[in-house]
Amino acid sequence: LLAGGVGGAGGPGVKADDFALEVAPLVLAEQAQIVGLYTALRAFLERARRDPEILPREGQDAAAGASAGWMGEERAAAERTAADTALLKILLSVDQPALLPFLRQPNACILAESELVLLRYQQLEQLVGLWQGRGLHVKALELLLSLGQQEGQVSSALRGVRATVDYLRKLPASELEVVVRFSAWPLRCEPQEGLRIFCDPSDPPSSEPERASGIPLHTTAAAALRRGGPLPPDAVYEHICASAGPELALRFLECVLAHPGPSGALASARLHDELARGYLATIARLCAQAEERVDEEADDAQGAAPAAAELGGSASPRPVRTRAARAAELAAELAAVRLRCAAFLQTSHKVGAEHLLAEIGADSGPAARSVRALAPERALLLGKLGRHEAALRLLLREMADVPAAEAYCARVSVGRDVALSLAECADGQAPFGRPQQPSTDAEPRSAVGVYDCLLRVLLRPDGEGEEDLPAALALLRRHPDEVDALVALELLPADMPLAALSGWLHGSVSALRQGARAAQVERNLAKTDSLALRAQLGEERRQPVTIKPGTLCAVCGKRIGTTVFARYPSGIVAHFACSGENLHVCPVTREDFRRRAFSPTGAP
């Protein structure tokens, strides 16, 4: 059209090239401008997610729509869906690190369209986050399972079991079936990593038993808080046993039961017994290995002398040092397990001590060696049952440890649990550690005459034992106020020289005198308090009570008149018939005046 028009106007000698136009090329927007536009749109959409009223509407502007407050539920959902889907595409274009946190939170993205976009750009980790934010946990975990078992060009963040473990740790307790279904694969492939689903052993331990075991026993409380509630420990224990074996299941029980927490409170007594059996079996196994190493060292020592004579007196000491190092490692491991076992048996209120003692058996037959190796643990169980004399006989007969028996008596006499510090016992020291907090266990613990029991065990041994008179005299000298003098005189030999008992008798008499003086002082103080309370009671009873014609009963609202009434320390006046059976309790406020310090006896 341009050529024809030009020819007609200019005549036949004019060509179109004479009127060529120079058009400037289109200047495209720079990358920075595009990013700026996307950033502005992203900020607008994020504001729209928080306040949908700012979105423009057809037929009215945003301000009018906001002032009118008109927004249907369907329209609001559609606008939120459009805003979230657009925001997903913008984040995918300009800020991919922010995309995953956005998808993991609840969102309203169009699911099918978002899945296609993420799959097109191979954003598999973001796809898992999208399903996680929408609550499609089964689809997300199936994808993680498929990717975790591949060894090709899969991202390192999705390869292996770690991504599945991290996902399962964040699921709420209501998704127990999903956790059980998809945790079997991590538990079979990498048991230690799979254990993090239920308790995280990677956090730094914070106490002595934890440092000894390498397992932080406090992490189950954090896991329960993260899940919104604890998982049922019995079901988790059965699942771990079936998937990874009893050894890992015992480590789970150690995490759950060693320290009080929400998960440990839900654990049944069977789990407490299982953990105790696991501890005892481990201790027996380590003791047997230690005895085998002692026998091997003895055999090596016997064979080393002829070998050294043949080699001219020079034998290589390297194998001896290697065996010594292994023996030291075994001893340290045994001490650590015994320390954890003692701490658990002391704090557990559900463990069946009677059943465990029956399972250990008597020290006879082929299992006698393992039973003797568990002597400290048996003494601890006997102490939990209140059978102090049997525990003391065990400590003196099988362990021959008088200081340990005295430490046992010291603990029981102050009303505390018997806590064995078996790490010290492994080093040849007293097997009872530092005092622990008093226990609230309902099991019987009769601490009366525990030192008398120890003296009886020392002077009246059963079976083939012999009396230990020097130890008994030392006990009397160290604890003159703890041993009953009459019981001691009955147990001591009749031909005992009085000079040998002079120190104990002097200390016992002094303790008796001191106790009598303390009792007299307490009695006088109680008498003074009683007199003061009686005087205060008299003052309270002498206070006048004015009953006017218009005075009403605080209970029924009728006039008191000339009927019998009751007046309470709070000033409330009521008919005697309306006061109820217990005159110590206010019929209006239900306050028990007996709980008040220095209050009257409650008489009207």
Image (cartoon, grey):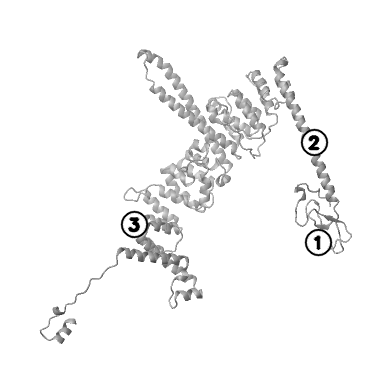
Tell me the number on the disc at residue 56: none
The quarter of the picture where the N terminus appears is bottom left
Residue 492 visible somewhere in the drawing: no
Q: Amino acid at mark 3?
A: Gln
Counting residues from the start of the chain, the first of labels 1 and 2 encountered is 2
Between 472 and 45, the one lying in front of the other is: 45
| Residue 538 in sight from this viewpoint | yes
**Left or right, 200 with reference to 481:** left
Residue 122, numbered circle: 3
Determine which quarter of the picture holds residue 456. top right
Task: Give the number of the mark in front: 1 or 3.
Answer: 1
- Residue 524: image tag: 2
Where, by quadrant of the figure, is residue 49 drawn? bottom left
Q: Tell me which numbered mark, 1 or 3, is placed earlier along the sequence.
A: 3
Reply above or below: 373 against 4.
above
Residue 122 image offset from top left, x and y in percent: 34, 57
